[in-house]
C-alpha cells in the first residue's frame, strides 16, 4: 500500500470514491446503572453504547442519531425533565461531562473539571443546574449552570463513593414551605446525604440522614415521592427504606426482593396514594403501593432474564423502559406490569463477527457474556441467542443458513442449529488453551479450527472426528481462511508466519514471514494469489503467494486486529486499536473513508456478502453496522 508506487500518485477517480456511514449501533452499557432512558417526548429513547450517546426511535429501529464526544465508556447518563438536554459522563483519563442539546443533536458544553471517572449525574427539577459526582478517586461534586456552562459551586464528595443522586425540588422550612435553596439526595455505602445548593451565594453543603433504630443498611439507589415529602432508598439486602423528609430520619424498611434493590421508579398515583416500581438483583420487577408512603405493600411481581440495570418512566407515566443486565430492553406497563421485549443487545465485550454464508442480512457475533447471537440486519433484532458452557465464552464463529459453529475460550467447539438455536453437538478439548479461529468448508462437510498453541485441526462434521492435524505454527493461530475449492487453506499466526496448506495431502505448501511482529489477520482476494495481512508491526502488507517478499507494505498508525476485503476486491476495511474503521481503495493504496464510533479496541470487521454493509465489533460491547456508499 503506497510505498512501492513509482512516479507521482494520481488523485483517485471519482467513481472509486466510497464513503462509510454509521447506520445502527447494537449495544447498551448495561454494566452501569441507568444507561438507558425513556425520553419525555414519549417516542424516543436515549442510551449509552460504549462512548457514544444514541437517540433512537422506540418504534423504528432504523432511526438512530449518534452523539460522539467521549473516548471511553459512558458511566452515567441523565436526561433533563423537559427533555431538551442530555448529560453524559465517562470514565478514564479524560473524565469529561458533556451537555448535549437534544433537538440540535449537538454538544453544548464539555466540562473537564473532574478526573478518573464520573459516577452520577442529575438535573435539578427545573433543569437549570446539573449536579455531577466524581468517583472515589476524584472525590468532588460540581454544580454547573446549564444555560451559561459556568461552575456554580463545588464541594468534597459525601458520601464516598456516591452511587446514586436524585434531585428533590427546594429545601423546605419547618412549615414545609419552599425556600430558595435547591436540594438533592445522594447515597453510597451506609450513608444517605442531603445536599443543599444556594445558587445565589454559590454554596454547597451536605447533611446526613439519621437512622432510626439499629438497622444498618448499604444503600444503592434513591427516588423521591411525588410530593417530595418522602425519600425511598433501595438497599443491598433487598429492602426499600422510607425516609420522612420533615425530620430526615429513616422511618421503616419494606422488604421486596433478594439480590439487592438495583433501581427504583416512582409512578404518579391518584389521591395522594404511593406507587413505586422496584427493580431487583434477582431479576424481579415489583410494584409497591399503598395509601401513604409508610403503608406500601407488594402488589405485583414479575421476573425478567436478569438483574435490572435501569428503569425509566415514560412522559405520560403509563409505561417503563427497563433494561436487564443481560442486555434485554423491556417496555413494562405501569398498572399491571405487563411486559413486552423491545430489543436485545450484547452485554459483554465482542470478539468476532461473521456473516452467514451468502446471506447479507444475517450475521453472527461472539460475546464475552457467553452467547453466540444471530442478528437480523433488517430490524437489528436478535433472532437467536445460543449460550455456550457456563464460565466460558465464544471467541470465534462461522455459519451457514443451517448450522453455526463456535469456538470457545475453554477449547470447546460447539454447533447450533440456525432455526431454533438448539445445541447440535460439541467437541470438548478441540484445542488446548482455547479455540482462536474457526471456519466451515463451502460444501459444509468439515470445519477447520485454529488454536492458542499453534495447531490447525480439521474435523469431519458427520463423524465429529479429527481428520487432519497441521502443526507448524509455533504460537497462536490468529486466523485461518479456506479457499473456495475446500482443498487449500491459509493461516496466519503470532509467530510471524503466513502458511498455505494442502488439506488433501495434509502438508504445507508455502511459507511467508513478516520481519518483526506477529500477524493478526488476513484477507484473500478472489484471484487466490493476492493476500493482505496486518499485525503487530503496525503495517498492512500485500503478498503475492508466488513471491517470497510482500509486494507492498503500508505503515499504519495503529495495530490492526482485523481486515476484510469487499466481495468485488476493490475495497479493504481495516480496524484495530485506533478505534476507527478505515476503508482503503486497493488499487490506489489509499484510505478513502473512515468511521468513528467505537470507544475500545475493535476486534473484528466483516463485509456483507453483497458489499453494501459492514459490521464492526469491539471490546466496548458495541456492534456497529455501517452503510457503504459508492
Image (spheres, helix red, strand yellow):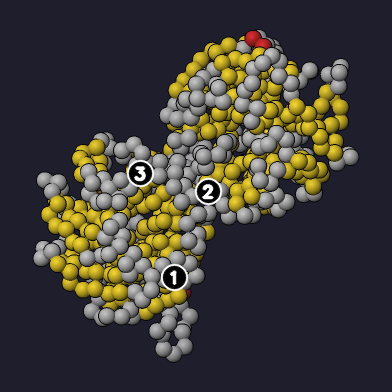
SS category of the residue bearing label 1: loop
Q: Nearer the viewer, mark 1 or mark 2?
A: 1
At horizontal 55% and vertical 21% (from top left) the residue drawn is: 238
Quarter of the C terminus within the rendering: bottom left
Residue 319 in sight from this viewpoint: no
Across and down, in percent, residue 88 comes to: 64, 45
Distance from disc 1 to disc 3, alpha carbons, whole Å, reads 28 Å
Quadrant housing residue 515: bottom left
129 or 577: nearer the viewer = 577
Q: Which mark is residue 538?
A: 1
At horizontal 12% and vertical 54% (from top left) the residue drawn is: 467
SS category of the residue bearing label 2: loop
Q: Is residue 456 left or right of residue 351?
A: left
Distance from disc 3 to disc 2, alpha carbons, whole Å, reads 20 Å
SS category of the residue bearing label 3: loop
Q: Is residue 295 left or right of residue 386?
A: right
Distance from disc 1 to disc 2, alpha carbons, whole Å, reads 25 Å
- Of callouts 1 and 3, the N-terminal one: 3
**Residue under label 3:** 393
Across and down, in percent, residue 289 comes to: 60, 13
Q: Which mark is residue 50?
A: 2
At horizontal 64% and vertical 30% (from top left) the residue drawn is: 189
At horizontal 62% and vertical 12% (from top left) the residue drawn is: 296
Q: Nearer the viewer, mark 3 or mark 2?
A: 3
Across and down, in percent, residue 580 comes to: 49, 61
- Of callouts 3 and 2, the N-terminal one: 2
- Of callouts 1 and 2, the N-terminal one: 2
Across and down, in percent, residue 585 comes to: 41, 72
Amino acid at each position: 500500500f503506497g510505498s512501492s508506487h513509482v512516479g507521482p500518485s494520481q488523485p483517485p477517480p471519482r467513481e472509486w470514491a466510497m464513503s462509510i456511514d454509521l447506520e445502527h449501533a447494537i449495544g447498551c452499557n448495561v454494566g452501569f446503572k441507568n444507561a438507558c432512558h425513556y425520553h419525555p417526548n414519549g417516542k424516543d429513547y436515549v442510551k449509552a453504547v460504549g462512548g457514544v450517546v444514541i437517540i433512537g426511535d422506540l418504534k423504528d429501529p432504523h432511526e438512530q442519531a449518534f452523539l460522539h464526544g467521549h473516548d471511553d465508556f459512558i458511566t452515567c447518563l441523565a436526561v433533563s425533565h423537559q427533555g431538551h438536554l442530555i448529560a453524559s459522563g465517562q470514565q478514564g483519563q479524560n473524565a469529561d461531562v458533556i451537555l448535549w442539546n437534544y433537538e440540535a443533536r449537538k454538544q453544548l458544553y464539555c466540562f473537564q473539571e473532574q478526573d478518573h471517572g464520573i459516577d452520577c449525574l442529575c438535573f435539578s427539577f427545573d433543569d437549570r443546574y446539573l449536579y455531577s459526582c466524581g468517583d472515589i478517586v476524584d472525590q468532588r461534586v460540581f454544580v454547573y449552570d446549564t444555560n451559561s456552562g459556568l461552575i456554580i459551586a463545588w464541594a468534597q464528595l459525601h458520601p464516598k463513593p456516591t452511587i446514586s443522586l436524585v434531585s428533590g425540588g427546594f429545601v423546605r422550612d419547618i412549615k414545609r414551605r419552599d425556600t430558595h435553596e435547591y436540594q438533592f439526595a445522594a447515597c453510597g455505602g451506609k450513608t444517605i446525604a442531603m445536599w443543599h445548593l444556594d445558587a445565589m451565594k454559590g454554596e454547597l453543603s451536605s447533611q446526613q440522614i439519621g437512622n432510626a433504630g439499629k438497622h444498618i443498611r448499604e444503600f444503592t439507589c434513591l427516588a423521591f415521592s411525588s410530593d417530595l415529602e418522602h425519600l425511598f432508598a433501595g438497599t443491598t439486602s433487598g429492602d426499600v427504606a422510607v425516609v420522612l423528609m420533615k425530620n430526615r430520619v429513616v422511618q421503616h424498611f419494606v422488604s421486596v426482593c433478594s439480590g439487592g434493590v438495583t433501581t427504583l421508579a416512582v409512578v404518579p398515583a391518584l389521591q395522594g396514594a404511593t406507587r413505586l416500581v422496584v427493580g431487583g438483583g434477582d431479576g424481579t420487577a415489583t410494584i409497591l403501593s399503598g395509601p401513604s408512603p409508610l403503608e406500601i405493600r407488594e402488589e405485583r411481581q414479575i421476573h425478567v432474564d436478569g438483574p435490572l440495570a435501569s428503569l425509566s418512566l415514560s412522559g405520560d407515566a403509563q409505561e417503563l423502559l427497563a433494561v436487564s443486565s443481560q442486555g434485554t430492553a423491556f417496555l413494562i406497563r405501569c398498572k399491571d406490569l405487563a411486559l413486552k421485549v423491545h430489543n436485545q443487545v450484547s452485554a459483554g465485550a465482542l470478539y468476532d463477527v461473521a456473516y452467514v454464508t451468502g446471506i447479507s442480512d444475517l450475521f453472527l457475533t461472539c460475546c464475552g457474556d457467553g452467547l453466540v447471537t444471530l442478528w437480523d440486519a433488517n430490524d437489528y433484532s436478535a433472532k437467536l441467542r445460543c449460550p455456550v458452557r457456563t464460565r466460558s465464552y465464544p471467541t470465534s464463529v462461522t455459519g451457514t443458513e443451517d448450522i453455526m459453529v463456535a469456538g470457545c475460550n475453554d477449547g470447546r467447539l460447539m454447533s447450533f442449529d440456525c432455526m431454533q438455536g438448539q445445541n447440535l453437538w460439541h467437541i470438548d478439548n478441540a484445542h488446548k488453551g482455547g479455540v482462536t479461529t474457526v471456519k466451515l468448508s463451502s460444501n459444509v462437510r468439515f470445519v477447520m479450527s485454529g488454536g492458542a498453541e499453534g495447531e490447525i485441526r480439521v474435523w469431519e462434521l458427520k463423524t465429529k472426528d479429527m481428520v487432519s492435524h497441521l502443526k507448524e505454527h509455533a504460537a497462536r493461530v490468529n486466523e485461518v481462511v479456506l479457499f473456495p475449492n475446500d482443498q487449500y487453506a491459509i493461516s496466519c499466526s503470532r509467530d510471524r508466519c503466513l502458511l498455505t496448506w494442502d488439506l488433501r495431502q495434509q502438508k504445507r505448501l508455502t511459507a511467508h514471514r513478516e520481519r518483526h511482529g506477529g500477524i493478526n489477520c488476513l484477507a484473500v482476494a478472489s484471484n487466490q494469489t493476492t493476500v493482505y495481512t496486518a499485525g503487530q508491526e503496525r503495517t498492512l502488507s500485500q503478498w503475492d503467494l508466488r513471491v517470497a517478499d510482500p509486494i507492498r507494505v503500508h505503515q499504519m498508525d495503529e495495530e490492526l486486529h482485523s481486515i476484510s476485503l469487499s466481495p468485488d476486491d476493490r475495497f479493504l476495511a481495516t480496524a484495530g486499536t485506533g478505534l476507527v474503521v478505515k476503508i482503503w481503495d486497493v488499487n490506489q493504496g489509499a484510505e478513502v473513508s473512515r468511521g468513528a464510533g467505537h470507544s475500545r479496541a475493535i476486534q473484528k470487521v466483516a463485509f456483507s456478502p453483497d458489499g453494501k454493509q459492514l459490521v464492526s465489533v469491539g471490546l466496548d460491547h458495541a456492534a456497529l453496522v455501517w452503510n457503504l456508499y459508492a
